Amino acid sequence: VLNRIDEVENLVQSYITICRKSLLLSCADKIDTMIKNGQILDDLAGIPMAVKDNICTKNLQTTCASKMLKNFISPYDATAVKKLYDKNAILLGKTNMDEFAMGSSTENSAFKITKNPWDLNRVPGGSSGGSAASVASGEAFFALGSDTGGSIRQPASFCGLVGLKPTYGLISRYGLVAYASSLEQIGPITKDVKDCALVLNTIAGYDNLDSTSVKRRKVNYLKCLKQDVKDIKIGVPIEYFGSELDEDIKKKIFNALDILEGLGAKYDEVSLPHMEYALPAYYIIAAAECSCNLSRFDGIRYGYRAESYNGIEDLLIKTRSKSFGDEVKRRIIFGTYCLSKGYYDEYYNRALKVRTLIKNDFQKIFDEYDVIIMPTTATVAFKLGEKKQKPLEMYMSDLCTVPVNITGFPAISIPCGFKNGLPIGLQIIGNYFEEETILRVAYTFE
Ligand code: GLN
């Protein structure tokens, strides 16, 4: 993998920080010695992994792809990272992303632009674009991403990979730099469904360091990978198969549904009537939460501080003006507006009501169906620069991914063929903590 990084990293630019080679080789030696001593190792021992740069790692920078945190080294490891270290997985480096995970193309990074390994003129998706590109190009065997509104599934879809956004509360968020806390989860980006189950087995589970973590019985996700979908009932929401959806993607998704039907599953058209409000509700909630979460970056406690200033207010203004990028500023301003007196009810509170309506729509379907199948994205990977100056168009690319973040349901994106040589993603959504079911359906296509 290190050789592969030497070969392709210049072109793909997946990483912000790569660990020192000598350190990595000594980790590998340690594993060798353990094997020689006859120790039984976990499946992940010695496996090279990449971690998104908004997930804290003790001895390496965690920059969130922002000038604000350019030199920040966390004093602790995120729980998900710690659990992987405990199994002797080896961290190769920290991957590029949209600044503070705000974006859908990884073009909002303060440091570099990651390319899609399938076509270097296209985006890898975002915000976990570096994580997806690293796995797709062979620069890591698997990666961790974070998904606030699609940031694991959309890049997985654009790069021909498997990406899982788990149920809210399944994986600890301790050590994930907060963007919109009520929406986001850490999750795996892998080459196939089995790897996804393997990584999930390690990182899922209760953590008392995250107050939103949920206590549940331990599940072995590898065990649910039977190739059996008999009697699985699938809902296909008509709202996501309209004119915005690329015709070729639609065909591929229906091909996949026919395969499932051939194996004994059944699918029906269903309706999620409030879905047109999902995207606006998401962007109000996400911006509102981001405006609060990012207030901790004040030039005093973390990261960058303006060189010269005149008093505390000037320090705050100069520090934040100079170190946040345009998209981050746009959201802080918009979020602050949505939460301000006089507008709170009209925007934020209304978005919360919409959130409940959308949740009820899903719940009704899950009363009758095991999973929902729909596209992950309405198009394949778009060209670099195509949407960079058009924030609304960029936001529109999250149409199919945000509903499960608003509601907390788990969803996986798996590869579902190609259009003009570019990967297509199919999304499987399940009821709360039904990761087993969505992995089982996904495994059909392996
Ligand atoms: N593209 C969405 C946003 O910009 C989702 C990002 C994410 O999931 N982190 O908010």
Image (spheres, rainbow, N blue to C red):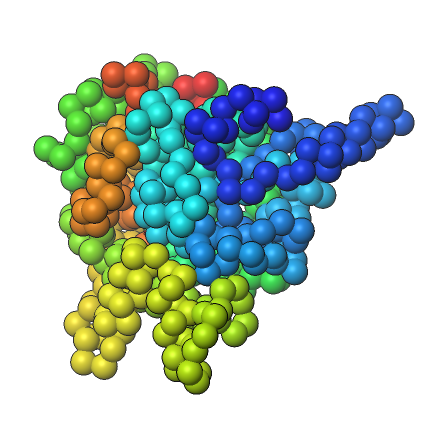
- Kindly identify the residue that appears in the image at 34 percent across and 22 percent down: 119
- Kindly identify the residue that appears in the image at 72 percent across and 43 percent down: 86
Q: Is residue 239 left or right of residue 178?
A: left
Q: Is residue 18 visible?
A: yes
**109 vs 262: above or below:** below
- Quadrant position of the N terminus in the picture: top right
Which residue of the protein is positioned furthest toward the bottom in this rendering?
Answer: 311
Image location (x, y in percent) of residue 116: 37, 28
- Quadrant position of the C terminus in the picture: top left
Image location (x, y in percent) of residue 374: 27, 33
**22 vs 398: above or below:** above
- Kindly identify the residue that appears in the image at 57 percent across and 45 percent down: 204
**102 vs 348: above or below:** above
Which residue of the protein is positioned furthest toward the left in this rendering?
Answer: 243
Using the rendered view, name the quadrant where residue 87 is placed: top right
Image location (x, y in percent) of residue 202: 62, 40
Image location (x, y in percent) of residue 212: 50, 61
